[in-house]
């Protein structure tokens, strides 16, 4: 297994995994292939890394770049992390998270964050086992639609 930056030719497979992750969370992915290409390859706000076993794509991490206004330092948020079920608990997630950390270090970022659904205890346990520090004092977040 090896991790590489995503390629445009990976978009159909990444899209499939986005749909699977959304379904897992009881949601529906509505991103089009054209918009996904813009998000990951044109806008500069996001990128993706993929895990491959031979020629097969077995996982991906979708990263968003942000800046902490109060410190002025960059931060990377792993917005999506998905591993095909038969490849879980085999180090694929760890490799993708390590790659995000290396990218953050190279770009002078303060750190890397990742979230989970409150009921996704498996992912939470995996992140704790990897030594990720749980953020408990960030407080509630709120959302408002703009349309």
Image (spheres, grey):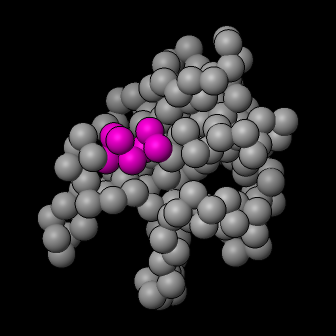
Closer-to-camera residue (106/32): 106
Q: Is residue 28 visible?
A: no
Q: Main secondary structure of the magenta part?
A: helix
Residue 3, image x, y percentages: 53, 27
Residue at horizontal 48 percent and vertical 78 percent from the top: 135
Residue 53, image x, y percentages: 68, 20
For the N terminus, the image quarter is top right
Region rendered in magenta = 98-104
Q: Vertically, is 61 above or below 25?
A: above
| View extreme (right): residue | 86
Tell me if residue 99 is in the magenta stretch: yes
Q: Vertically, is 24 above or below 42?
A: below
Residue at horizontal 16 percent and vertical 70 percent from the top: 71
In the drawing, does residue 138 fall left or right of residue 124?
left
Residue at horizontal 45 percent and vertical 87 percent from the top: 137
Closer-to-camera residue (43/144): 43
Residue 62, image x, y percentages: 51, 43
Residue 93, image x, y percentages: 62, 44
Closer-to-camera residue (118/32): 118
Q: Is residue 81 visible?
A: yes
Residue at horizontal 35 percent and vertical 30 percent from the top: 42
């Amino acid at each position: 297994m090896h991790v590489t930056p995503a390629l445009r030719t990976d978009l159909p497979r990444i899209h499939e995994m986005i749909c699977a992750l959304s379904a897992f969370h009881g949601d529906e992915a509505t991103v089009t292939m054209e918009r996904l290409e813009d998000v990951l390859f044109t806008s500069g706000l996001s990128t993706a890394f993929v895990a491959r076993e031979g020629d097969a794509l077995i996982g991906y991490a979708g990263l968003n770049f942000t800046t902490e206004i109060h410190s002025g330092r960059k931060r990377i948020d792993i917005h999506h992390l998905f591993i095909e079920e038969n490849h879980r608990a085999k180090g694929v997630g760890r490799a993708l998270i390590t790659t995000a950390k290396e990218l953050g270090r190279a770009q002078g970022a303060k750190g890397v964050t990742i979230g989970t659904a409150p009921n996704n205890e498996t992912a939470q346990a995996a992140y704790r086992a990897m030594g990720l520090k749980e953020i408990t004092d960030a407080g509630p977040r709120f959302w408002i639609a703009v349309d």
